[in-house]
Amino acid sequence: MREIIAATGNAHKVREIQSILAPYQIRVLPAEAAGRMPEVLEDGLTFADNAVLKALAGARAWGRCVLADDSGLEVQALGGAPGVHSARYAGEGGNDGRNLAKLLQNLAGQTDRRARFVCVIALAGPQGLLGVAEGEVRGHIAEAPSGNGGFGYDPVFIPEGYRESFAALPEAVKNTLSHRSRALQAALAQGLFSALPD
């Protein structure tokens, strides 16, 4: 069983990553298992920029192999917003509810509701960056939230080929479709996890 630390304070993300990587004998530890999460100014222009910043900061702080992700929602009619600002869309200290409300308000009356979730995974170790991988899932934004699962924008995102939102789909189904799952699968296919210690 190989180990990696997830450089995130988001417990939902940690659980999702743990669930996706468990069949590959990769144990994902939350950041608090290694100590305090280092402060990182996420001022990158892309998801990849921010994922790399977080992975390198965690690896330097803890001297361990670290996985970081940066992810968000890009909405066609909003010119790709909220994009890298997805977690802070309603302002600093914004939460899922306020972000969701602002998104739906900004899409009021819009007929083009196409969107995609993007996730970039970065792995780093004490020796530096091990690599990055990206995943995406396309779909559209619903008129109103539905479902009790997921987090973030999941209640309004309906993936292509489905009628239910990510928040309404069973977790096992979401974990095969999600942008995070696809980024992790790409990282596995690229052999990025092969450098992890046993």
Image (spheres, helix red, strand yellow):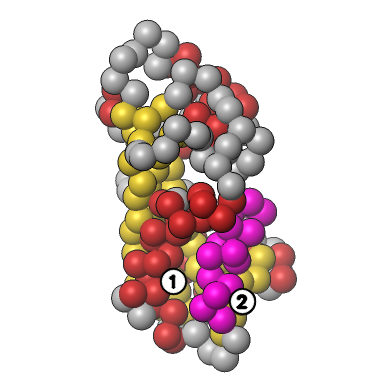
Q: Position of residue 128 (x, y in %)?
A: 41, 78
Quarter of the image with the N terminus is bottom right
Mark 1 Cα within 10 Å, few/some/many (few <14, many 20+)?
many
Most prominent secondary structure in the magenta stretch? helix
Q: Is residue 13 above or below residue 153?
A: below
Amino acid at the residue labelled 1: Leu
In this figure, what is the number of numbered marks? 2
Q: Is residue 95 left or right of residue 89?
A: right
The residue at 45%/32% (across/down) is 163
Front-lying residue, 24 or 90 = 24
Magenta range is 10-25
> Does the rendering let one see residue 107?
yes
Q: Position of residue 177 (x, y in %)?
A: 43, 52
The residue at 37%/30% (across/down) is 140
Q: Position of residue 50 (x, y in %)?
A: 41, 54
- Is residue 96 one of those drawn in magenta? no
The residue at 34%/50% (across/down) is 136
Residue 78's image quarter? top left
For mark 1, what is the residue? 123
Q: Secondary structure at mark 2?
A: strand
The residue at 39%/59% (across/down) is 182
Give the numbered dot on residue 27. 2
Q: Position of residue 118 (x, y in %)?
A: 37, 47
- Is residue 16 one of those drawn in magenta? yes
Q: Is residue 18 left or right of residue 194?
A: right
Q: Secondary structure at mark 1?
A: strand
Quarter of the image with the C terminus is bottom right
Amino acid at the residue labelled 2: Arg
Task: Choose the circle earlier in sequence order: 1 or 2.
Answer: 2
